[in-house]
């Protein structure tokens, strides 16, 4: 589902921030992935908070007490909701995803194109699995399309491993 029709009628994110302490010490590859995910999210997303449907929102992502925290505010900065998701269901996928990403980043520098493509297929498959899980965990709280869930999952991975 590309969700383009849904986005026109639904809410969206206009700003995304990450807990500053989690940004420190990240590798250049992780920083790049974070920056691209945030840029892409701002450009094109569907984030429809239950109870505030159709509103533009700001999102601050952090980790507290082994939970992923979505702190959602309106455009004026007034808090609309704080949603905490346990990281436990994501651990295996995130761990496997990071192992494949390390192989992918190494392959880009040293491997043949066929090897890079094979690793990338595995990376995309794990990313899709994590994105679907994130959509399921947010169900009933926030409606997100698959493209938005994919970009959010990129941030979940980066936050989880640096948190």
Image: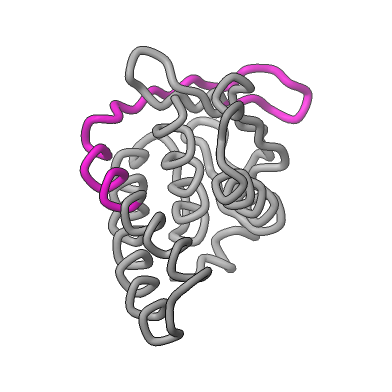
Q: Residue at x 60, y 29 (%)?
A: 23
**Relative to 91, residue 83 above or below:** above
* Residue furthest out toward the top: 65
| Quadrant in which the C terminus is drawn | top left
61 within the magenta span = no
Which residue occupies the foreground of this view, 85 or 65? 65
Question: Coloured how?
Answer: one colour
Estimate the x, y position of residue 22 in percent, counting from the top left: 55, 25
93 within the magenta span = yes
Which residue occupies the foreground of this view, 18 or 158? 158
Q: Residue at x 38, y 87 (%)?
A: 114
**Relative to 139, residue 162 above or below:** above
The residue range painted magenta reads 72-97
* Residue furthest out toward the bottom: 114
Q: Residue at x 47, y 72 (%)?
A: 110
Q: Is residue 144 left or right of residue 129?
A: right
């Amino acid at each position: 589902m590309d969700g383009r029709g849904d986005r026109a009628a639904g809410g969206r994110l206009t700003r995304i921030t990450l807990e500053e302490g989690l940004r420190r010490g990240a590798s250049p590859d992780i920083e790049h992935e974070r920056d691209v995910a945030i840029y892409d999210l701002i450009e094109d997303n569907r984030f429809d908070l239950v109870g505030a449907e159709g509103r533009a929102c700001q999102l601050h992502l952090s980790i507290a007490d082994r939970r992923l925290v979505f702190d959602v505010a309106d455009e004026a900065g007034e808090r609309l909701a704080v949603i905490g998701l346990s990281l436990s269901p994501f651990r295996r996928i995130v761990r496997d995803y990071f192992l494949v990403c390390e192989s992918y980043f190494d392959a880009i520098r040293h491997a043949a194109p066929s090897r890079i493509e094979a690793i990338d297929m595995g990376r995309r498959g794990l990313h899709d699995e994590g994105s679907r899980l994130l959509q399921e965990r947010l169900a009933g709280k926030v409606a997100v399309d698959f493209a938005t869930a994919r970009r959010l999952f990129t941030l979940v991975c980066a936050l989880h491993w640096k948190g």
